[in-house]
Image: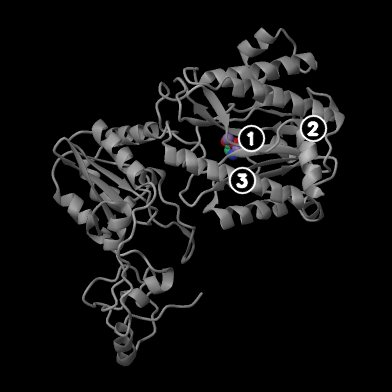
Amino acid sequence: MTEQPAPENPEGDEPIKQRKNGLYPTVSDELAASMKSGWADTELRDLRPIEQAGEAAARRAAISARFPGERLVIPAGNLKTRSNDTEYAFRASTEYVHLTGDQTEDAVLVLEPSGEGHTAAAYLMPRSNRENGEFWLDGMGELWVGRRHSLGEAEQLLGIPCLDVRTAADALKALDGPVRIVRGHDAGIEAALADRTDAGRDDELKTALGELRLVKDAFEIGELQKAVDSTVRGFEDVVKVLDKAEATSERYIEGTFFLRARVEGNDIGYGSICAAGPHATTLHWVRNDGAVRSGELLLLDAGVETHTLYTADVTRTLPVNGTYSELQRKIYDAVYESQEAGIAAVRPGAKYRDFHDASQRVLAEKLVEWGLLEGPVEHVLELGLQRRFTLHGTGHMLGLDVHDCATARTETYVGGVLEPGMVLTVEPGLYFQPDDLTVPAEYRGIGVRIEDDILVTEDGNRNMSAALPRASGEVEAWMARLKG
Ligand code: GLY
Ligand code: MN
Ligand code: MN
């Protein structure tokens, strides 16, 4: 990285937002004068609204109706320091993205009560000032971080008035009346509103926004399908390089999938779990630094996040050498049967918990049949004894967040009923820990999970990730084809 030059006139005619280190070398008057002029007008005109502008407006209208007469403040969040003066890649808050379709760092959406509803405004960082040197002297200047949209351009794209975010805190402080903010994203705006907000009331806003995302609109379903389709290609990429992973480590798998995610989407939607051999029994194995061995299984749980930030969440458990051993197949087929039972229970009007119960019953039956748990099955299920080996819930809502809608109330989510437009994962698994003395030695260190992304339709469901084979024989044939 390059050390930044100093502001020649740090006071300028507008404040400089961020200066790093205070260790600026001097800039000559001649250079400062030179940098002020000679730049073309690059303003973009006649921009078309972003594709989801209409859906975002409908989402804002829904949350407006839920909180009549109250000002609602939804920040996108700020950059987070990784080390010294480097930052993590920015990822805007899910709530802000859902209500705007925008992903600008530091932005704040304000819904202002107006008549029966609200008017929306987005506070954004405008183009960098060239007169005061901000654009090249400031660490957040466009010369360093890239061109931003002007406020006029942003208005055309988002379909709402856009204002300078540096005025947001003062503007919000100056306004009277009830206000709620989505906490946890922007400490500065929260502090500005601290004496006017209340944690309990703010939580209600976050809860309502989580519940607003339970049912996806047509745009969101399209984006989730794109995420899944890219993810399918990422899994194919991995199968093609398993020999290279064997020669190196799980990192080769992580890097291969990441390449697909970065080229086709924004990122991965969560840390890829590239778990070979006994690592498959660690539910969130993301160190991905282990050996990949022929004869063992690879549990790959990964999802591409689209440019609009919708993520897939898919798992396949693959034989590294292309063929399941007898015991691996027995366990795999049991998980497959369990997943089939779970998917069959996904339909409108079904209780959310039904697919979990259906999947767990199959797994409990298998564990009793194999002599790993003492029956009867009803007794096992009643006491939850199968959970020593099934470990986690059988699925969750999927959307902008991999575990989407987490702030929704129990009665609307886990205790609720499935509706068309909901998208959830069905992901049963069986895991035999390497040090589990209650199972025969040959089971130890085997972990199998199969995870698909399921859309609830008007008359049942659609498996959005059906393009990836699931049945053991089909997985083997698919791997053989890809490895060619
Ligand atoms: N990848 C996290 C999960 O499957 O829920
Ligand atoms: Mn999942
Ligand atoms: Mn997963």
Of residue 367 and residue 67, the one placed in the foreground of this image is 67
Using a 10 Å C-alpha cutoff, classify the residue at mark 2 as few (fewer than 14 neighbours), some (14 to 19) or many (20 or more). Answer: some
**Drawn side of residue 44 relative to residue 336, left or right:** left
Q: Label 2 amino acid?
A: Gly
In the rendered image, the residue lying farthest to the bottom is: 30
Q: Which residue is mark 3?
A: 231
Residue 391: image quadrant is: top right
Q: Could you tell me which secondary element the residue under label 2 belongs to?
A: helix
| Coordinates of residue 459 in the picture (x, y in percent) | 51, 21
- Say whether marks 1 and 3 touch (CB < 8 Å): no
Residues at circles 3 and 2 in contact by the CB criterion of under 8 Å: no
- The mark total stands at 3
The residue indicated by pointer 1 is: 466
Residue at point 74% right, 47% down? 239
**Image location of residue 236, percent across then percent down:** 70, 47
* Left or right: where 101 falls relative to 287: left
Query: Sequence order check: which comes first, mark 3 or mark 2?
Result: 3
Q: CA distance from mark 3 to mark 2?
A: 21 Å
Question: Mark 1 or mark 3: which comes first in sequence?
Answer: 3
Q: Is 186 on the left-hand or right-hand side of 12?
A: right
Quadrant holding ligand 3? Answer: top right
Tell me the kind of residue under disc 3.
Answer: Thr
Tell me the SS state at disc 3: helix
**Residue 416 position within the rendered picture, expressed as x and y whole percent measured from the top left:** 44, 20
Q: CA distance from mark 2 to mark 1?
A: 15 Å
Residue at 33% in and 73% down: 42
Q: Is residue 184 visible?
A: yes
The residue located at (27%, 58%) in the rendering is 165
Look at label 1 and name its amino acid: Ala
Instruction: Identify the residue at horizontal 29%, vertical 35% (top origin).
Output: 63
- The residue to which callout 2 is attached is 473
